[in-house]
Image (cartoon, coloured by chain):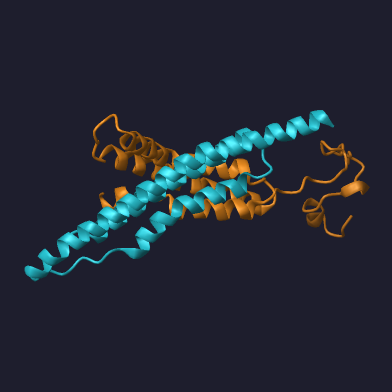
Amino acid sequence: MTALPDDDALSWGGSTDPTHVESPVVESPDGDGQTNAAEPGTSSGLLVAYGAFGLVFIVYLVGWLIAIQSAPAGLSGSLAVVMDRIGQFLAFLSPALWFFGVFLLAPESRARTRIVWLAVGVVILAPWPFILGY
Amino acid sequence: MTMNSNRSSAGLWATMIIAVVFGLVFAFYLYEAISQAISLAQYVAVQNPVLKRVGHALLSFPWLVIGAYVVLPIVTFVLAVVIGRRRTVPIRVGIFVLALAALSAASLTLESIASAATRIN
C-alpha cells in the first residue's frame, strides 16, 4: 500500500491484494513452456523469389505461345516440318518444364542451386522470337 | 549375384537405348543448325555484291550466334547425359526431354537473332 490514496487507485495490488486471484498458466501446445520460434526469414524470402521466377516463366509461356502461333506453317509431311512443329511445341513448354524440372532435380536443401538454375532458365528461355518479332 | 548383374546389365541397356534415341533427335538439331548456317552464308554471299552495287551497307555473317547455334545441340546432349547419371530411367528420360525443350527454345532464339542481324533495312 502506498501513502496516498490516489496512488492506490493507479496501481495493481498484485499478490498482496486479498482479492487477487491467480490466473491459470497457459501451456504451449508442445508442452515445453516456451513460445514457438518464428519461421526463418530466408524461407519466406525464398518463397517470394520462387513466386517471382514462376511469374516470369508464365510470361515466357505466353510469349512463346504468341511466337509459335505467328510462325509460318511449312508444308506438312516432311520430317523437317514435323520436327520443326515438335521443336516449337517443346519451346512453348520449356519454361514450365524448366521450372518444375529445377524443383524436381535440385533437392530442397540446396536453395542456392535452385535459384541459380532458375536464373539460367530466365536467361536462356526468353521468347526472343516474340520480342524481336520473328 | 546373378540377379544383381542382370539388373545392372538391364540398366546399362536402358541407358544405351535412351542415349541413342535422344542422341538421334539431338543429331537432327545439329544437322538443322549446320544446314541453316550454310544457307545463311549463301544468302549473305548472294546479297552482298548486290548491296555493294547499290551502295548499301553490307551484311555481316553473325559468327558468334551461328557458332552457338551449331554447338548448342552437342552441349545440351552432354549436359543431359552428365546430369542424368546415377538417376532412375524415368528421371533420365525427363532430363532429356527438358534438355530438348531448352534446346528448342534456345535454337529458335538464335535463329531469330541471326535473322534480325542479317535483315536488309
- Residues B1 and A41: in front is B1
- Residues A16 and A52: in front is A52
Letter of the chain shown orange in the rendering: A
Q: In x, y percent, where is residue A86?
A: 38, 35
Lateral position of residue B3 relative to residue B53, left or right = right
Residue at image location 86% in from the left, 49% down from the top: A13
Quarter holding the C terminus of chain B is bottom left
Q: In x, y percent, where is residue A12?
A: 82, 50
Residue at image location 40% in from the left, 55% down from the top: B70
Letter of the chain shown cyan in the rendering: B
Quarter holding the N terminus of chain B is top right
Residue at image location 16% in from the left, 65% down from the top: B48
Residue at image location 26% in from the left, 56% down from the top: B40
Q: Can residue A95 be seen in this view?
A: no
Lateral position of residue B114 relative to residue A122, left or right = left
Q: In x, y percent, where is residue B13?
A: 64, 34
Total numbered badges shown on the rendered structure? 0
Lateral position of residue A108 relative to residue B34, left or right = right
Q: Can residue B107 be seen in this view?
A: yes
Using the image, determine if residue B81 lies above or below residue B62: above
